[in-house]
Image: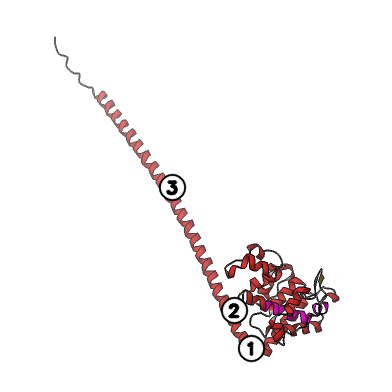
Amino acid sequence: MTEEQPQEKTPQQSDVEALQRMLAADATNTGSNATLIKTFIAGFAVSVVICVIVGVVAIRAVAVMRDTYQKNTESVILARSNMESANAWEQLSPSQKRERLQDQYFQIVRYYTTNVAPNQKLNDDQIQSTFNSLWDTTSRVTSVNFFLPIAYMKVKTNFNPAFSNGYQSGIVGFYFKEADQAANLNRVKTDQAFQVVFKGSETLLNSDMSIKLLVAEFDDLLLTFNGRVDWALYAKFTNVYDVMAKYWKDGQGQIPDSAFKTGDFAEAYKYYNAFKNWTIPSKQDK
């Protein structure tokens, strides 16, 4: 048999095969390019997201730093202002201090009793005499800030000399037993500025005497609670024995958080902090 010889490709066939190879190569390259493009887009998207996240974090960090700086600056300014005020106050003579405190006391009492019936508020002479009691007693002790008993009376009776609520009477709102105990404090018995002989309702309805007993009581409470005004005020509005037994814990305890939110103690503590900084809270702020 005769071997068959391979047929030679015609020029047309060669051209067709070459075209097929080119198309196959293009298809392969197109797939690779598409993959590269998808990878690039995905990588770009991830980069954008990362940049956005970093930007947000940076902006927040800057905002926090700015707020912290502002708060620190305000604290420094406030501390400096308080220091300057304290220094200025200490440079005043006793008569100048008395005059400033008297003016402030008159403003406080008049402001909160403007629309009160005449028989339920102090007249000018009574405001003056109650101020004298406050000044004479608080200036004798270092424990009781002048504005502490004022804040207490604002909340308890709103400076009503004829206040009566059950067994509580007078501008301080004393119970008989409470006033009697205050009258037997060592401070009242030994210091002439505090001396009051308890005579029941007569003493409770005498604003000057009641205020002296109130200051003496605060002096005793502050001694008990290591000078802590918040604790002394809290005990005055509740019961000193309960406070000692339940919360004080030899100075390691805490006043319940709820007590600072609502109630007489919360109100009085707010007024005290305002008064001692020479501000008079608006009636609408109550």
Badge 2: few (under 14), some or many (20 or more) residues near its Cα, within 10 Å? few
Q: Earlier in the sequence, mark 2 or mark 1?
A: 2
Please indicate, yes or no, whether residue 175 appears anywhere in the rendered image: no
For badge 2, the amino acid type reads: Asn
Q: Residue at x 31, y 31 (%)?
A: 24
Residue 45 position, x and y percent, is 43, 47
The residue where tag 2 is placed is 82
Helix, strand or loop under label 1: loop
Residue 211 position, x and y percent, is 75, 80
Please indicate, yes or no, whether residue 73 appears anywhere in the rendered image: yes
Quick one: 275 or 39, which is closer to the camera? 275
For badge 1, the amino acid type reads: Leu
Q: Which residues are magenta?
A: 201-219
Q: Say whether marks 2 and 1 touch (CB < 8 Å).
A: no
Q: Residue at x 41, y 48 (%)?
A: 44
The CA distance from mark 2 to mark 1 is 16 Å
The residue where tag 3 is placed is 45
Helix, strand or loop under label 2: helix
Kindly identify which numbered label has been placed on residue 92. Answer: 1
Tell me the quarter of the picture where residue 270 sits.
Answer: bottom right
Helix, strand or loop under label 3: helix
Badge 3: few (under 14), some or many (20 or more) residues near its Cα, within 10 Å? few
Quick one: 67 or 221, which is closer to the camera? 221
For badge 3, the amino acid type reads: Ala
Residue 222 position, x and y percent, is 64, 76
Relative horizontal placement of residue 201, taking residue 72 as reference (left or right)? right
Q: Is residue 218 magenta?
A: yes
Q: What is the tally of numbered marks visible in this picture? A: 3
**Residue extending furthest top?**
1
The CA distance from mark 3 to mark 1 is 70 Å
Comparing labels 3 and 1, the label whose residue is closer to the camera: 1
